[in-house]
Image (cartoon, rainbow, N blue to C red):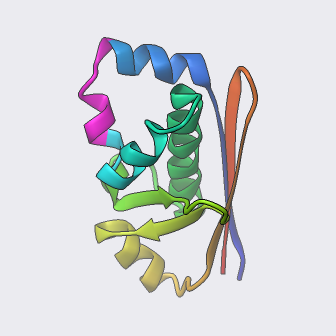
Amino acid sequence: MVRIGVDIIEIERLDRAVKRHPRLITRLFTAKEQEYCFKRHRVAASLAVRFAAKEAVLKMLGVGLGYCSFKDIEILRKEGSAPSIVLHGKAKELARSLGLKDICVSLSHCHDYATAMVFAS
C-alpha cells in the first residue's frame, strides 16, 4: 500500500510567526535542520518548505498535529543529494507499525509558497 501526504504554506506566514515567537525555531526544527537552513540564501523559504514536509508526513501517517513532536520528523539534505526524511520517536514507531519502509519527499518553493509531497510504502 502506498501512502501520500501533501502540504503547502505561505512562506511569509511562517516567517512572521518565527519573528514574533523566535523559540518556534527550536520547537519545530532539529539542530541539523537549523544548521542547513541558516546557511541558505532564502532562510525563510528553507524553513517553510521543511515545515510543509513535516505537515505532509503527518498527513501521510494519518495523524494530526500533536501526535508527535515536529522534531520527530527531520528533513535532511546533504549537498548534491535529494532531501530525505528521518523519523524519530512516535513518528518512527507509527511508520514501523504501518509497515512503512521507504519514505520519499519532494520539496519546492517559489517567492510566496513552499510545498512538499511525501510518498511512503
Q: Is any atom of residue 67 visible in this view?
A: no
Q: In this view of the protein, which residue sits in the foreground, 76 or 86?
A: 76
- On the image, the x and y values in percent for residue 103 come to 61, 73
The majority secondary structure of the magenta stretch comes to helix
Q: How many marks?
A: 0
Q: In this view of the protein, which residue sits in the foreground, 49 or 121?
A: 49
Left or right: 21 as drawn, with respect to 53: left
Q: Which residues are magenta?
A: 20-27
- On the image, the x and y values in percent for residue 10 come to 63, 23
Residue 32: quarter of image:
bottom left
Q: Is residue 3 above or below residue 117?
A: below
Q: Residue at x 59, y 59 (%)?
A: 79
Left or right: 72 as drawn, with respect to 14: left
Q: In this view of the protein, which residue sits in the foreground, 88 or 41?
A: 41
- On the image, the x and y values in percent for residue 102 come to 61, 81
Q: Residue at x 72, y 77 (%)?
A: 2
Q: Is any atom of residue 78 visible in this view?
A: yes
What is the quadrant of the C terminus in the image?
A: bottom right
Q: Residue at x 50, y 36 (%)?
A: 47
Q: Is residue 46 above or below residue 111?
A: below
Q: Residue at x 41, y 69 (%)?
A: 87
What is the quadrant of the N terminus in the image?
A: bottom right
Residue 11: quarter of image:
top right
Q: Is residue 107 above or below residue 114?
A: below
- On the image, the x and y values in percent for residue 118 come to 66, 61
Q: Is residue 66 inside the magenta stretch? A: no
